[in-house]
C-alpha cells in the first residue's frame, strides 16, 4: 500500500516536477522577454562630420561647439574631421552621416532656391538636392505653391514655408558668415563696389595707370584648390562655389542687384501666358561664339536644358539629371530652338518671376558636352554607378562663352584665364546693354592662384604677388590684413550659410521633436561671437536679410522659435531635462537613452 | 616668397649649420682625412645610402596616391587618440610665448633638417663605417614603417581636430612654412611622428658613437628632445604620435644594429656568391 502509494506519489511527483519545471521555465522566459522589451537601449550616439581646420576656417570650430552642447545634453557626440572629397562622397552622394557642419551653395537668397534644397523628391538624389533626406508633405506643397503664387499671396506662402522649416529643422542655421577679403589698390580699384561672388563684380573694377602700363593682369588668390582644378559647372561639390565657372560660362540671364534677373546672353525675352500655360520667347545676342571659335546658336541652348534634365545617352536606362540645376530644370516643360537665335520655352505651373530663374543655367556647347553622355568609368572600367562623364569630368580646358576664356593651367595650384575678345561685352556689335556693363573686363589676363592657407594668401597679397585674396579667409586672419599697410580689408555678407545638417533618414533624427531639441541646444549668438569673431549674422531662416523674412522669424538676440536652452553658451540642466521630456525622450543620469 | 625661395633659404641655413658643426664636432683633421678616404668609405656605405635615397624618392612619388588609398582603406583614429590623451597638447601650449614659438618653429624646420643631415657627414668622416650603415638602415626602417602606418591610419593632428584648444602656432608665426610642410606631408599623416622618430634615431646613434663624437651626444639629445616637443608645442602632433615615434626609433635602431651585424657576418658569403656567378657568366 505504502509502496503503491509511494509509487503513485513518486510518479505524480515526477510528473508534477516535470510540469512544474516546464511551467516555471515558461513563466520565467515570458517574464524575461517581457522585461527585455522594456530595457533601455543605451546612450544615444551621434557623429558630426566636417572639414579639418586646414580646409575651412570655421567648420571644425562650429562642429566642436555643437559637439560640446550635445555632450551636455546627454548625447555621446563625436566630431570627425574628414577630407573634402570624402565628405562629398559620404554626405552628398551616399548619405552616410548623422550630422554634418558645412556651407550651403552660394545661390541668391530667393525663395525658390529652397525647392531643390528641401523638396522630398530629392531624398535619393546626390548633391545639394535635399542631402538631409527631409520629407514633409506640407513643405512640398508650400514649395509648389510659392512657384505659382504672386504678390501678397506668394509672400504669405513663403512666410508659412519659412516658419514650417524653422519649426521642423531639417537643418539648423549656424550663421551667415561675411566673406573676408584682402585687396590692394595700386593696380586695380573699385573693389568696394564690386560683388566678387558674381562675375558682374569684375566688370566694376578699374585698372589704374600702373596696371594699364604693364600687361593688364589681375591676380587673385583662393584657398579652394578645387576651384582651380575642376572647371566643370555641373559637378557635385561639397563647397559649391562658382565664381570661376560663372566667368567662363554665360547663362541667358543673370541676377543683377539682389534678386532681379536680367537678360545677359539673351538680347531680350518675352513672356506670354495662355491660360495655365506660361511660355517665353528668348532672343539671343547676334554673332556669338564659343571660346573655340564655333558659333553659339539656339541649338546649344535647347541642348543645355535637355542635358541638365538628363545627361545620360538616349539608349541608357533611367535619367541622370544634374543635381545642381535641378531647381531650374524642374521649372521647364520643354525648350525648342525655332531658328539660330530664337528659343521657345514652355514652363511648368509657375509665375513669370519664378520662371526667370530657369534662365540662369550656364549655357553649354553641344559639340563638347554631347560626348560626355557615356557612363563615367574608372580607367576605362565601368564602375556601375548611376553617373555620367558629364558629372565627373574636370572639364579642363573649359570651352564656354563667358567674358574670360581658359588659357592654361600651369600647375594644380594655378589657373590662367584671359579676356575673351569675341564676347559681347568686348565687341561693338554685341547688341545693347546697360551702361554699367560698358567696357567689359578691365584686365587682359586673370591669374588665379590657390594657396594652402589664408595666412599665406594674405602675405602674398601684402607683398604684391596677388592683387586680391578673395576666398577662404577666416576671421583669425583679419588682424594680418589690417596690419598690412598695402592691404584693404573688405567684408561682404555671403549668401552661403553654415548649417548643422541632420540626416533625417536615421533615427532619432527622423523625429522633428528630436531635431527641435537639437536646434535649441545651439547658442547661435555665442557662435557668432566666439567662432566667427563677429563676422557672421545669426539667423532663423535661409531667407534672413531679405524682405521675404516674416516678422515672426526676425532675430531678436536669440532664435525666435527655438531659443537656446541656457545662456552664454552654457546649457541649463533643468531646462534641458524638461525639453527632452516634453519631446518624448528619456534623459537619465546625464545620458539621453536610445529608448 | 615662393616654395622655391623658401626651400633655398632652408638649404642655405642648414648648409651653414652643417659647415659650422662639421668644424666643431668633426674637426679639421678628420675632415682632411675624409677627403682622401671618401671614395672607399662611400663604396662601403653606398648601397645603404642608395636604398635610403630610393625609399625617399618612392615616398615622394607615391604620396598623393597613398593618401587617396589611405582614404579608402585607412582606419580613422583621431577620436581614439583624443580619447587617450584629451587636451594634453593644449596644456603644453599654455606656456606659449613669442620667444618659445620662434625657437620651436626654427627647431621644427631648420633644426630637424640639420639633425637629419649632420650625422651623414659625421659618420662619413670616421674610419669605422658601421655607424653610417646602421643609421641609414634605421632611417629606411623609420620611413618604411612610417609610410605603412600613414597608409593604415587616418589621423588629423590636434590643430586640425580641436582648433579651439590648440593653435597652429607654426603657421600663425610663420604662415609660409606651410608651403614647405604641405609639400612634404599631408595633414592626415600624423601617426606616428616621423619628426620625433628620426630625431630620436639620430640621438640614439649619437649615443652609440659617443666615443668618436663625445660632444655631439648632448647636442643631439637636446635637439632631438626639442624637435619632439616642438611637434606638440606647434600643434602638429599628438602626444601619442610622439610616443609612437619614440618607440619606432628604438625599434628601428635595434633592428638596424641586428641587420648590420647580420650583413657583416654574411658579407663575405654574398660577395663570394656574386663573384662565382660573375665567373660562370664569363
Image: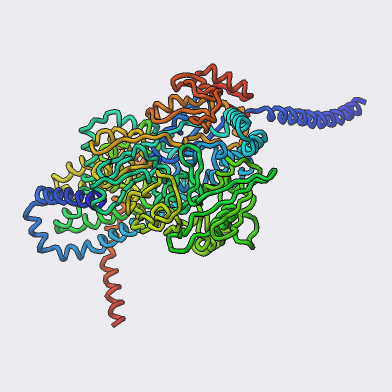
- Residue sitting at 59 percent across and 30 percent down? A155
Colour treatment of the image? rainbow
Would you place residue B163 above or below residue B278 in this image? Answer: above
Task: Name the residue nearer the viewer: A516 or B282.
Answer: A516
**B168 sits left or right of A78 in the view:** left
Q: Residue furthest top?
A: A574
Residue B128 lies in what quarter of the image?
bottom left
For this view, does B47 lie left or right of residue A154?
left
Q: Going by the picture, which residue comes out furthest to the left? A: B29
Give the residue drawn at x 31%, y 44%.
Answer: A206
Where residue B191 sits: x, y (%)? Answer: 37, 44
Task: Give the percent coordinates (x, y) of residue B124.
Answer: 17, 57
Residue A366 higher or lower than A511, as above or below:
below
Residue A372 in sight in this render: no
- In this rendered view, identify the residue nearer to me: B94 or B10: B10
| Residue closer to the observer: B156 or A214 | A214
Split into 4 quadrants, where in the image is the N terminus of chain A?
A: top right
Amino acid at each position: 500500500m505504502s509502496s503503491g502509494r509511494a509509487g503513485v506519489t513518486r510518479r505524480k511527483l515526477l510528473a508534477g516536477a516535470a510540469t512544474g519545471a516546464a511551467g516555471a521555465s515558461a513563466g520565467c522566459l515570458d517574464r524575461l522577454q517581457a522585461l527585455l522589451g522594456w530595457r533601455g537601449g543605451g546612450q544615444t550616439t551621434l557623429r558630426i562630420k566636417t572639414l579639418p581646420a586646414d580646409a575651412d576656417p570655421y567648420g571644425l570650430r562650429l562642429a566642436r561647439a555643437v559637439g560640446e552642447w550635445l555632450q551636455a545634453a546627454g548625447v555621446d557626440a563625436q566630431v570627425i574631421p574628414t577630407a573634402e572629397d570624402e565628405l562629398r562622397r559620404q554626405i552628398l552622394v551616399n548619405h552616410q552621416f548623422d550630422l554634418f557642419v558645412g556651407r550651403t551653395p552660394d545661390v541668391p537668397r530667393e525663395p525658390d532656391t529652397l525647392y531643390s534644397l528641401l523638396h522630398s523628391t530629392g531624398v535619393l538624389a546626390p548633391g545639394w538636392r535635399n542631402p538631409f533626406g527631409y520629407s514633409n508633405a506640407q513643405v512640398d506643397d508650400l514649395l509648389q505653391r510659392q512657384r505659382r503664387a504672386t504678390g501678397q499671396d506668394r509672400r504669405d506662402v513663403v512666410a508659412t514655408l519659412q516658419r514650417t522649416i524653422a519649426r521642423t529643422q531639417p537643418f539648423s542655421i549656424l550663421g551667415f558668415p561675411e566673406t573676408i577679403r584682402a585687396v590692394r589698390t595700386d593696380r586695380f580699384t573699385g573693389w568696394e563696389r564690386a560683388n566678387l561672388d558674381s562675375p558682374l563684380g569684375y566688370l566694376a573694377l578699374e585698372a589704374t595707370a600702373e596696371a594699364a602700363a604693364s600687361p593688364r593682369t589681375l591676380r587673385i588668390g583662393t584657398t579652394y584648390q578645387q576651384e582651380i582644378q575642376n572647371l566643370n559647372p555641373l559637378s557635385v561639390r561639397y563647397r559649391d562655389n562658382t565664381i570661376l565657372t560663372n566667368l567662363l560660362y554665360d547663362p541667358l540671364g543673370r541676377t543683377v542687384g539682389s534678386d532681379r534677373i536680367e537678360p545677359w546672353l539673351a538680347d531680350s525675352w518675352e513672356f506670354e501666358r495662355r491660360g495655365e500655360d506660361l511660355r517665353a520667347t528668348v532672343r539671343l545676342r547676334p554673332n556669338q561664339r564659343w571660346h573655340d571659335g564655333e558659333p553659339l546658336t539656339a541649338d546649344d541652348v535647347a541642348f543645355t536644358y535637355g542635358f541638365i534634365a538628363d545627361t545620360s545617352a538616349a539608349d541608357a536606362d533611367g535619367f541622370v539629371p544634374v543635381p545642381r540645376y535641378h531647381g531650374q530644370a524642374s521649372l521647364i516643360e520643354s525648350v525648342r530652338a525655332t531658328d539660330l537665335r530664337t528659343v521657345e520655352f514652355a514652363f511648368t505651373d509657375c509665375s513669370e518671376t519664378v520662371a526667370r530663374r530657369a534662365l540662369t543655367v550656364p549655357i553649354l556647347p553641344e559639340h563638347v558636352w554631347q560626348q560626355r553622355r557615356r557612363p563615367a568609368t574608372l580607367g576605362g572600367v565601368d564602375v556601375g554607378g548611376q553617373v555620367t562623364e558629364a558629372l565627373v569630368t574636370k572639364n579642363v580646358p573649359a570651352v564656354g562663352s563667358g567674358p574670360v576664356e581658359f588659357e592654361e593651367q600651369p600647375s594644380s595650384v594655378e589657373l590662367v584665364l584671359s579676356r575673351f575678345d569675341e564676347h559681347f561685352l568686348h565687341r561693338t556689335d554685341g547688341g545693347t546693354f546697360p551702361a554699367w556693363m560698358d567696357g567689359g573686363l578691365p584686365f587682359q589676363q586673370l591669374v588665379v592662384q590657390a594657396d594652402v592657407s589664408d595666412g599665406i594668401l594674405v602675405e602674398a597679397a601684402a607683398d604684391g604677388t596677388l592683387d586680391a585674396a578673395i576666398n577662404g579667409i577666416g576671421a583669425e586672419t583679419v588682424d594680418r590684413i589690417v596690419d598690412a599697410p598695402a592691404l584693404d580689408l573688405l567684408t561682404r555678407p555671403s549668401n552661403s550659410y553654415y548649417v548643422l545638417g541632420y540626416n533625417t533618414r536615421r533615427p532619432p533624427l527622423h523625429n522633428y521633436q528630436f531635431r527641435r531639441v537639437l536646434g535649441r541646444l545651439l547658442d547661435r549668438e555665442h557662435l557668432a561671437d566666439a567662432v566667427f569673431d563677429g563676422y557672421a549674422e545669426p539667423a532663423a531662416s535661409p531667407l534672413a536679410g531679405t524682405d521675404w523674412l516674416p516678422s515672426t522669424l526676425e532675430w531678436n538676440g536669440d532664435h525666435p522659435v527655438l531659443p537656446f536652452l541656457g545662456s552664454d553658451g552654457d546649457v541649463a540642466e533643468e531646462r534641458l531635462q524638461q525639453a527632452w521630456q516634453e519631446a518624448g525622450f528619456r534623459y537619465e543620469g546625464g545620458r539621453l537613452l536610445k529608448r | 616668397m615662393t616654395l622655391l625661395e623658401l626651400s633655398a633659404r632652408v638649404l642655405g641655413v642648414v648648409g651653414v649649420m652643417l659647415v659650422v658643426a662639421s668644424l666643431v664636432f668633426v674637426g679639421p683633421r678628420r675632415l682632411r682625412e675624409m677627403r682622401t678616404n671618401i671614395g672607399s668609405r662611400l663604396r662601403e656605405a653606398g648601397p645603404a645610402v642608395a636604398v635610403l635615397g630610393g625609399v625617399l624618392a618612392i615616398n615622394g612619388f607615391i604620396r598623393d596616391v597613398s593618401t587617396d588609398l589611405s582614404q579608402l582603406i585607412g582606419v580613422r583614429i583621431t577620436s581614439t587618440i583624443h580619447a587617450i590623451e584629451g587636451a594634453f597638447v593644449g596644456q603644453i601650449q599654455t606656456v606659449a610665448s613669442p620667444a618659445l614659438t620662434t625657437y620651436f618653429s626654427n627647431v621644427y624646420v631648420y633644426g630637424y633638417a640639420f639633425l637629419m643631415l649632420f650625422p651623414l657627414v659625421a659618420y662619413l668622416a670616421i674610419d669605422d663605417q658601421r655607424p653610417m650603415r646602421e643609421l641609414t638602415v634605421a632611417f629606411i626602417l623609420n620611413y618604411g614603417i612610417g609610410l605603412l602606418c600613414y597608409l593604415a591610419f587616418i589621423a588629423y593632428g590636434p590643430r586640425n581636430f580641436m582648433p579651439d584648444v590648440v593653435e597652429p602656432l607654426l603657421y600663425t608665426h610663420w604662415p609660409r612654412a606651410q608651403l614647405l610642410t604641405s609639400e612634404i606631408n599631408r595633414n592626415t599623416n600624423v601617426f606616428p611622428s616621423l619628426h620625433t622618430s628620426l630625431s630620436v634615431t639620430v640621438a640614439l646613434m649619437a649615443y652609440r658613437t659617443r666615443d668618436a663624437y663625445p660632444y655631439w651626444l648632448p647636442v643631439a639629445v637636446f635637439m632631438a628632445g626639442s624637435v619632439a616637443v616642438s611637434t606638440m608645442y606647434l600643434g602638429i602632433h599628438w602626444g601619442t604620435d610622439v610616443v609612437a615615434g619614440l618607440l619606432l626609433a628604438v625599434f628601428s635602431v635595434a633592428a638596424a644594429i641586428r641587420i648590420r651585424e647580420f650583413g657583416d657576418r654574411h658579407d663575405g658569403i654574398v660577395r663570394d656568391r656574386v663573384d662565382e656567378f660573375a665567373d660562370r657568366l664569363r
